[in-house]
């Protein structure tokens, strides 16, 4: 069985030997069966094989793989505050996270999510989600920037994961041509493509184009959803509108430039956010 699995996944000798050795570890013995069950459920499609191969590489390096929710966690991410918040979003069934990440699960698309931790002190972003290249094999990686987010409260972590999962979904929709599930309304998708073309004329870097066009789109259409996700995660304390300040973080300049919000309105939202209780950290 393991030899067949190694052949089907085109594993190298190191990976194949590691998989064979799982039978000598009581905690890992069921792994080959988990992988085969996952592949069976996904009809052994190439995308499922790519996920399984990536998963084995991550497991060899000490990471974790959630075969149920189809999420890969790099070793650097496992056991961190961000990992705990992600687990809470999943176990609590957060509606915004669930719907945003839906396309990455249960064979709904060829794309899967991977989470990792990066160490970039000069980068002011809490997290980032690079636009996947042709070698990504359908894996879209969300990178949490430890130096920037360290010491933040649980709602900041929650916002970062919700924000970046939206980026991941927008990457998928761009590559897949707005293919479902959860296709964008045609008006929004056409605006997205228009902004993509506009920023492509400014800079040819896919990461630049994706960041600019997606942030413009998020500023116009996604603030309420992010705020709802934060509100739900915080046990619906205060009012949903009180969370909009945090939802706007990273999108402020796009909102002002697009005339979706004014600085005075942003200042008012900041005052409202000060009323939000921060006493429901699931990771204390």
Image (spheres, rainbow, N blue to C red):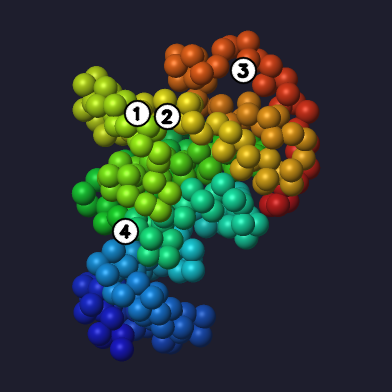
Residue 266 marker: 3
Q: Position of residue 248 (x, y in %)?
A: 56, 27
User: Is residue 76 positioned above or below 46 on the image?
Assistant: above
User: Is residue 8 positioned above or below 245 on the image?
Assistant: below
Cα separation between marks 1 and 4: 24 Å
Question: Toward which corner of the image does residue 87 lie, by quadrant?
Answer: bottom right
Residue 191 marker: 1
Q: Nearer the viewer, mark 1 or mark 2?
A: 1
User: Is residue 40 positioned above or below 195 on the image?
Assistant: below
Residue 14 marker: none
Marks 2 and 3: CB-CB under 8 Å?
Answer: no
Marks 1 and 2: CB-CB under 8 Å?
Answer: yes
Most foreground residue, 127 or 97: 97
Marks 3 and 4: CB-CB under 8 Å?
Answer: no
Q: Nearer the viewer, mark 2 or mark 3?
A: 2
> Mark 2 or 3 closer to N-term?
2
């Amino acid at each position: 069985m393991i030899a067949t699995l190694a052949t089907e996944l085109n594993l190298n000798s190191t990976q194949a030997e590691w998989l064979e050795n799982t039978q000598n570890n009581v905690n890992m013995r069921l792994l080959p069966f988990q992988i085969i069950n996952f592949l069976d459920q996904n009809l052994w499609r190439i995308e499922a094989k790519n996920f399984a191969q990536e998963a084995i590489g991550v497991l060899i390096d000490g990471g974790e793989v959630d075969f149920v929710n189809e999420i890969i966690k790099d070793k650097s991410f496992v056991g961190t505050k961000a990992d705990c918040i992600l687990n809470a979003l999943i176990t609590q069934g957060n509606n915004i996270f669930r719907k945003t990440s839906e396309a990455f699960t249960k064979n709904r698309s060829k794309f899967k999510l991977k989470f990792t931790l990066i160490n970039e002190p000069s980068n002011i972003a809490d997290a980032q989600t690079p636009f996947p290249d042709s070698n990504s094999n359908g894996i879209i990686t969300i990178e949490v920037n430890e130096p920037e987010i360290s010491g933040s409260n649980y709602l900041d972590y929650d916002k970062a994961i919700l924000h970046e999962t939206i980026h991941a979904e927008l990457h998928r929709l761009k590559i897949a041509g707005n293919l479902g599930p959860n296709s964008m309304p045609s008006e929004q998708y056409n605006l997205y493509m228009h902004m993509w073309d506009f920023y492509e004329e400014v800079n040819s870097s896919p990461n630049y184009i994706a960041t600019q066009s997606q942030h413009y789109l998020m500023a116009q259409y996604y603030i309420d959803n992010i705020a709802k996700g934060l509100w739900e995660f915080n046990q619906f304390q205060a009012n949903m509108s009180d969370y909009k300040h945090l939802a706007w973080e990273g999108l402020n300049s796009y909102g002002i430039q697009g005339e979706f919000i004014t600085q005075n309105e942003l200042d008012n939202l900041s005052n409202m956010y000060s009323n939000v209780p921060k006493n429901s950290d699931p990771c204390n």
